[in-house]
Image (cartoon, grey):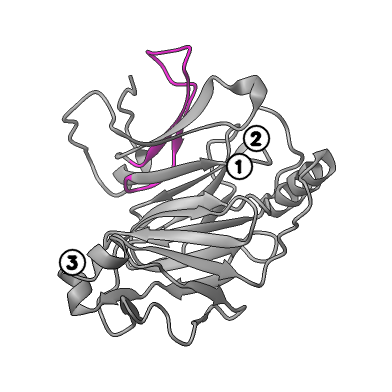
Amino acid sequence: QLKRVTNTLVLQGSSKVDVISREASALCIDFFKNEKAQNLYIAGTEDGLVHKCSVLYSEQTLENYMAHTGPVYAVRCSPYVTDLFLTCSADESVALWDHKQTNPLLELKKDKDKIQDLAWAPFDSCVFASISRDASLKVWDLSSSTMNPLISVTVPAWDPKPEVAEGEAASKKGSRPESPVYATSAAGSPNRPASPSTEMGDFKDDLPPPELTCVAFAPNSPVVLVGGNDGIVRVYGITNVDAPQASRDKAFTKKQAERLTKASGMVMPTKV
């Protein structure tokens, strides 16, 4: 059980807080990427707190982090530096943490709406993507900048043709149209195909954008997928990042760990 802990960030400027339940609601969980610490995991809660826990203990947490002033929607442990994890929240911020410290190493605040999800890039330890409810997709490279994202785009709305919306064409060609791949330039503007899925519909910038719900990277290529509440998965190809195609051996993993360690400001990578 996650015991409710008072979030001092929320209490700033307030004299009291109303407690309805003694238990905190966990909204997201991720395990540390370390074979020697398979029992340890991170849990984000609706109170804005993050807890380090162990499956071996059911009545207490190992550490509490006053992470955000709003619900924590995603926690993602780094696949390369096992001490580090990311969090995102309804308070419109992303934070990078060292689990041994109760203050964040970095705070990224470039969004204007709730940040719904995060994903580390498997091909680069310093690259991750975030999505917000206002249809904003951002790709960050911590080795390049912690002030501005590498890529920032607004995901467009999908406008199906009337017969597709009514299900007539869907029965002939499948239940969902295929989304075109977007090649994103260094400036962050999507370079669209000349005629994307014209038989099924088109992407429109003049329609209300979807609410984004999830984001993930392809395991072996610089491609990021974004899901929305309209039932469409959008696929973006990222052209301005280095994604090695060679096997990720120990030398590659060590180099990636060193890069993220330097970018995050850690002294040295250690194990959980």
**Three-letter code, disc 3:** Gly
Residue at 49% of width from left, 21% of height from top? 62
Magenta stretch?
48-71
Residue neighbourhood size for the residue with mark 1, other residues' Cα within 10 Å, grouped as few (<14), some (14–19), many (≥20) = many
Distance CA(mark 3)–CA(mark 1): 42 Å
Q: Residue furthest bottom?
A: 194
**Three-letter code, disc 1:** Ser
- Residue 186 coordinates in the image, percent (x, y): 62, 78
Indicate the quadrant where residue 113 lies: bottom left
Q: Which residue is mark 1?
A: 78
- Any mark on residue 166, and which? none
Residue neighbourhood size for the residue with mark 3, other residues' Cα within 10 Å, grouped as few (<14), some (14–19), many (≥20) = some
Residue at 56% of width from left, 54% of height from top? 218
State left or right for residue 160 relative to residue 234. Answer: left
Q: Which residue is mark 2?
A: 82
Distance CA(mark 2)–CA(mark 1): 6 Å
Q: Is residue 65 highlighted in magenta?
A: yes
Q: Residue furthest front?
A: 172
- Any mark on residue 167, and which? 3
- Residue 103 coordinates in the image, percent (x, y): 53, 41
Disc 2 + disc 1, Cβ < 8 Å: yes
Q: Secondary structure at mark 3?
A: loop
**Three-letter code, disc 2:** Thr
Distance CA(mark 2)–CA(mark 3): 47 Å
Tell which circle, 3 or 1, labels the residue nearer the N-terminal end: 1
Indicate the quadrant where residue 139 lies: bottom right
